[in-house]
Amino acid sequence: MKKWIIIAMAAVMIGAASFVYSTRSANAEPLEIGASAPNFTTSGALAGKEFKFSLADKLKNGPVVLYFFPQVFTEGCTIEANMFAEATEDFSAAGATVIGMSGDDIEGLKKFSVSECRDKFAVAQADAKILDDYQVRISPNLVRANRTSYVIGQDGKILFVHSARAPQGHVTGSLELVQKLAGS
């Protein structure tokens, strides 16, 4: 009897793994360099306070580093937020705005903006449309992003793309580009 239960559990796990693999592999690649960044307005949080975030409005001030992450308070997302927080002054010196994007609710984002973003940069809600427009949605059944960073120029064009599960590389690559743009 136990043998059949183990075999059934293994079959379910293999099926689940196949489903995860198939939904990930079915996703489109991230937007390409040179593509137009889809415009959007959404709710954001900075230092625990909610506000409306408009990509078009932020681009008037300089390039925007838009980084998508899977879920607040998970290990990789915390590491990445801490890294962006540590580099916020460097991004600002280069004239760039950093905004993290996640499918989490605004209450979770408000808490994350204080503890993990250290009140240094904003995070905002990415609904299914935003995730689909930026081609970063993990699965059609989830409003969750894969880890992808974009640098968007003032003209609304994608200048840099980095898509990788590991948080390392997202900050350094985007910072190098915005510093080149600023001539620093």
Image (tube, rainbow, N blue to C red):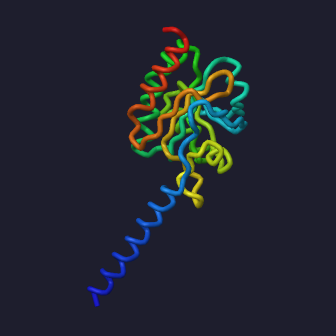
Image: 91 above or below 104: above
> Seen in the image, is 72 located left or right of residue 157?
left
Instruction: Give residue 55's position: percent from left, percent from top.
Output: 69, 30
Of 43 and 112, the residue lying toward us: 43
Of 105 and 20, the residue lying toward us: 20
| Residue at the image position 51 percent from the left and 60 percent from the top | 23
Q: Is residue 78 visible?
A: yes
| Residue at the image position 47 percent from the left and 21 percent from the top | 175
| Residue at the image position 58 percent from the left and 47 percent from the top | 104
> Seen in the image, is 122 located left or right of residue 75?
right
Instruction: Give residue 60's position: percent from left, percent from top.
Output: 71, 19
Instruction: Give residue 24's position: percent from left, percent from top.
Output: 49, 56
Quadrant in the rendering for residue 168:
top left
> Seen in the image, is 8 located left or right of residue 92?
left
Residue reaching furthest top?
184
Picture quarter with the N terminus? bottom left
Instruction: Give residue 118's position: percent from left, percent from top.
Output: 49, 28
Residue reaching furthest left?
3
